[in-house]
Image (cartoon, grey):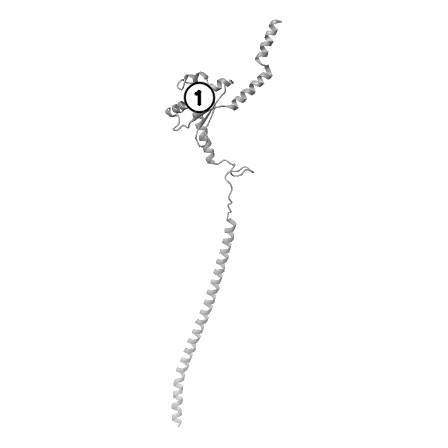
Amino acid sequence: MLAVKRILCSKEWTLSPYTTAITRMMCHITARHELLADQRVSWLMTYKERCIYSSACLSGGNKLMKMLANKKKKHWYKTPLQSRPLGLPDFVKPSKKNLEDSVRVRTLNNIIYKAVTDLLNSYEVNSDIAAYNIQISKVSLPPDFSSCRIYWKTSLSAEQDGQIQHALDKCAPRIRYLLISHQILGGVPPLVFIRDKQYAAMMEVENLLKIADYGSGEDEINNSSISDVG
């Protein structure tokens, strides 16, 4: 019995160093795994905090950029190109097209005025027309170019004005033909000669003023005859 106990004790003594080494190794491995787990958790927490911090920085930077962008943003307002007179409706204000048409019509009026004046002073139209010494006051073309109104100055004699009007009406087609043949204009509307009533009224006013200032011619003759008799 003593021998058996010694053998068993010897066997337990021989196995105990191995078991303690394995136990130590297992404890060491377990401790290492726990350390690695703790390090991993701490690393994840640190990474998460960094991400949160960086996102907070980015959001703060974005807000700052938005604030700066709002400060630098310029507001543009529509302003009229030209100052318009107050109190005038739109249909009264002249448009660009109307201005261009008026300039064109004015130019054509000047061209026809000069050409008709030269023809009336020449014998190319009619000798009677040149004898009357007719003077043109103005030329007016309507917007539709349906006719060409030519105003002539009165001679202060009703009988002579009637003769002049008759001669001009008779020679109007001839004058229009000469304007076209001389290539003054590409197309000339029918000519209409009109006695300038405005010029006639102005001349009558001037004659009345002369009579009021100096008297009539008959009064001057009577005064001169009375002085001769005396």
In the image, residue 39 sits, relative to residue 144, either above or below, namely below
> Residue 46 location in percent, x, y?
47, 65
Name the element at disc 1. helix
- In the picture, the quarter occupied by the C terminus is top right
- In the picture, residue 208 is in which quadrant? top right
In the image, residue 194 sits, relative to residue 219, either above or below, namely below
- In the picture, the quarter occupied by the N terminus is bottom left
> Residue 54 location in percent, x, y?
47, 60
In the image, residue 93 sits, relative to residue 75, either above or below, namely above
Q: Residues within 10 Å of mark 1 (few under 14, many from 20)?
A: many
Between 106 and 136, the residue placed more toward the observer is 136
Q: Please, which residue is most extreme toward the bottom here?
A: 1
Left or right relative to 5: residue 195:
right
> Residue 21 location in percent, x, y?
40, 80
Between 219 and 170, the residue placed more toward the observer is 170
Give amino acid for label 1. Leu
Left or right relative to 119: residue 156:
right
Left or right relative to 202: residue 192:
left
Mark 1, residue position: 168
- In the picture, residue 186 is in which quadrant? top left
Which residue is located at x 52 percent, y 50 percent?
A: 71
Between 16 and 133, the residue placed more toward the observer is 133
Which residue is located at x 44 percent, y 16 percent?
A: 131
Which residue is located at x 54 percent, y 22 percent?
A: 202
Between 109 and 63, the residue placed more toward the observer is 109
